[in-house]
Amino acid sequence: MTCLIAYHDGDKTDERQHGWQMRLTAYLPGCQLVPLADNAADDAEIALVWGPPDGRLAELSQLKLAVSLGQGVDHLMVPGKLPDDIPLIRIVDPDMSHALSQWVILAALDHLRDGPMYREQARQRIFSSHSQRQTRGLPLAVYGMGAIGSMIATRLADIGFQVHGWSRSERPQAGVITMHHGHAGFDKLLSTCQLHVCILPLTDETWHIFGADAFAAMPRGAYFINGGRGAQVDEAALLQAIVSGHIAGATLDVFEHEPLPDNHPFWDESRITIWPHVAAQTNPETAAQQVADAIMAMQAGHVPANLVDRQRGY
C-alpha cells in the first residue's frame, strides 16, 4: 500500500529524511516521504514533523495523522500548528530514554565533581586539587516520572543518589525511588533536595513551574538541570537565583526561545552550562517501528499507541 508521508524536522538535513525513509520502508513497503515544503506533500495522509511552519499542516487536505518527531508534543499544541481534529501521537523510544539518562548523569556528576572549575584550571595551566564533595546518599529530585523520568531516576539511584520522583498525580512507589505528587509533594522536594532534574512535559500547569518562589525554596547551593522544556523555567528568576549565589548553577538543554538568542544573558553566566537541545535525539533506527505501527493502526481504523490527550497536553 502506498503511503505518502510529509516530513519536516526544522533545519535538519536531507540525511535525516533519508534515514526515516529507509527505516520505514522496511515496515511499510511503498511508503514515500516528501518534504513538507514541497507541493507533493499536499496529498499526504501522515505528517512526521518537528516544529512545522504555522498553517502548513492545515493545508494538507488528506491529513489523517500527525506524528511528533520526539516525545514532546508542545510544538504542535500551539494555535496554528495542527488542526484540532487530527490525531497526534508521540514517539516513546527507549533509546531516547537511555540517551537522556546519560545526559542527566553527565550533568549531575560534572557539577558535583567540579568539572567546570577543573577545566578552567587546565585552561590556565593550574594543577591544584580541591576537596571532593560527599555525594553518597545526596537527595535528588526528578520531576516527571514517565518513561524517561523513571529510567533516569532508577539509574541515578544505581550510582548512589537518594532519589525522589515527583508526578502531578499519585503513582506507585518505583523500586528504591521515593514517590511524591501534587503541590505538597512538589514543595517538599524543592526544600529538601540538593539536585533538581526537570523532565516534565510542557502543559498549562507546568509553564514557569520553576519560578522565583521555587528557586527560593531550594536549599542554598542547590543545582538545577532541565531536560524537559524551556518554558517550564522563568529564565530571569533562574538567572537571579544564580547571580545572588542562592543556586549554585544550572545545566540546561532547553530554552523558552530556541535557538537561544545571541544576546541572552545565559551566555555570559559561567555557572550555566548550555546545551543546544541535544540531550536525546530521535533515532529512526529504534523509533521507525513505532511510527509504522501507528500508521498501520490508523489505516486499519484502530486507535494508535501513544495517542496524545489534548486536554492533558501529553
Image (cartoon, helix red, strand yellow):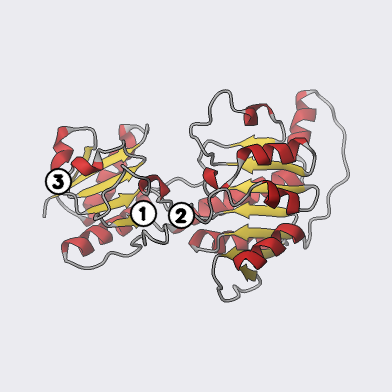
In the image, residue 106 sits, relative to residue 122, either above or below, namely below
| Tag 2 and tag 1, C-beta contact below 8 Å | yes
Amino acid type, callout 3:
Ser
Residue 295 picture quarter? bottom left
| Tag 3 and tag 2, C-beta contact below 8 Å | no
State how far apart marks 1 and 3 are (Cα): 26 Å
> Percent position (x, y) of residue 188?
71, 64
Q: Tell me the tag on residue 61.
A: 3
Q: Earlier in the sequence, mark 2 or mark 1?
A: 2
Q: Secondary structure at mark 3?
A: loop
Q: Residues within 10 Å of mark 1 (few under 14, many from 20)?
A: many
Amino acid type, callout 1:
Ala
Q: Secondary structure at mark 2?
A: helix
Residue at the spot of label 2: 95
> Percent position (x, y) of residue 299?
16, 61
- From the image, state whether disc 1 or disc 3 is nearer to you: 3
Q: Tell me the tag on residue 287.
A: 1
Residue 148 appears in the figure: yes
Q: Secondary structure at mark 1?
A: helix
Q: Residue at x 79, y 60 (%)?
A: 136
Q: Tell me the tag on residue 150.
A: none
Residue 275 picture quarter? top right
State how far apart marks 2 and 1 are (Cα): 8 Å
Of residues 6 and 24, the one drawn nearer to the viewer in this rendering: 6
- From the image, state whether disc 3 or disc 2 is nearer to you: 3
> Percent position (x, y) of residue 280?
49, 47
